[in-house]
Image (cartoon, helix red, strand yellow):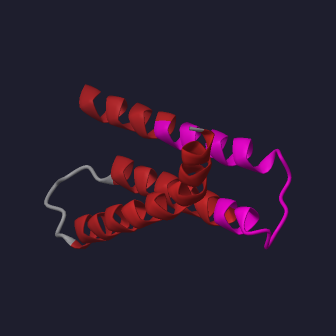
Amino acid sequence: MSSIGYCLGIVAPYYNLALVIIVTILFLRLFSLSNKGVYIKPWKILFLAILVYIVEEIINIMETANLITVSSLLFPFLEMIIISLFIYMLLLQKEHTKK
């Protein structure tokens, strides 16, 4: 059973990146549409959080392949950035709905 978990741990960053590429394409399509009074700033913040996630996954893949070594503090720092962007996005949306 542990070999299945080990294999999934190795493969997971790759299929995560494949799914994130699809999401990135959808975001780029969203941003290319004409914005007729749509409040899109929270979506841009969410896209920024996804870009940070992409950087995190690329670093994870490179570290798993022993191409680089990173500090043990890097991944929690990147996660903190992502969570902060999510919270900021929600607060922006809350302020917008109050108006």
Image location (x, y in percent) of residue 61: 65, 64
Between residues 53 and 83, which one lies in front from this camera angle? 53
Which residue is depicted at the point 61% across and 46% down?
3
Magenta: main secondary structure equals helix
- Residue 82 is left or right of residue 24, and the answer is right
Could you say which quadrant of the image residue 92 lies in? top left
Say above or below: 45 vs 84: below
Image location (x, y in percent) of residue 21: 39, 68
Between residues 26 and 7, which one lies in front from this camera angle? 7
Which residue is depicted at the point 79% across and 68% down?
66
Whether 33 is among the magenta residues is no
- Residue 79 is left or right of residue 30, and the answer is right
Q: Which residues are magenta?
A: 60-86
Whether 61 is among the magenta residues is yes
| Total numbered labels | 0
Say above or below: 28 vs 93: below
* Image quadrant containing the N terminus: top right
Between residues 50 and 88, which one lies in front from this camera angle? 50
Which residue is depicted at the point 77% across and 50% down?
74
Single out the residue that lies furthest toward the top. 98
Residue 99 visible, this orientation:
no
Residue 71 visible, this orientation:
yes
* Image quadrant containing the C terminus: top left
Which residue is depicted at the point 63% across and 43% down?
79
Image location (x, y in percent) of residue 90: 40, 34
Single out the residue that lies furthest toward the left. 36
Say above or below: 75 vs 20: above
Image location (x, y in percent) of residue 42: 37, 47
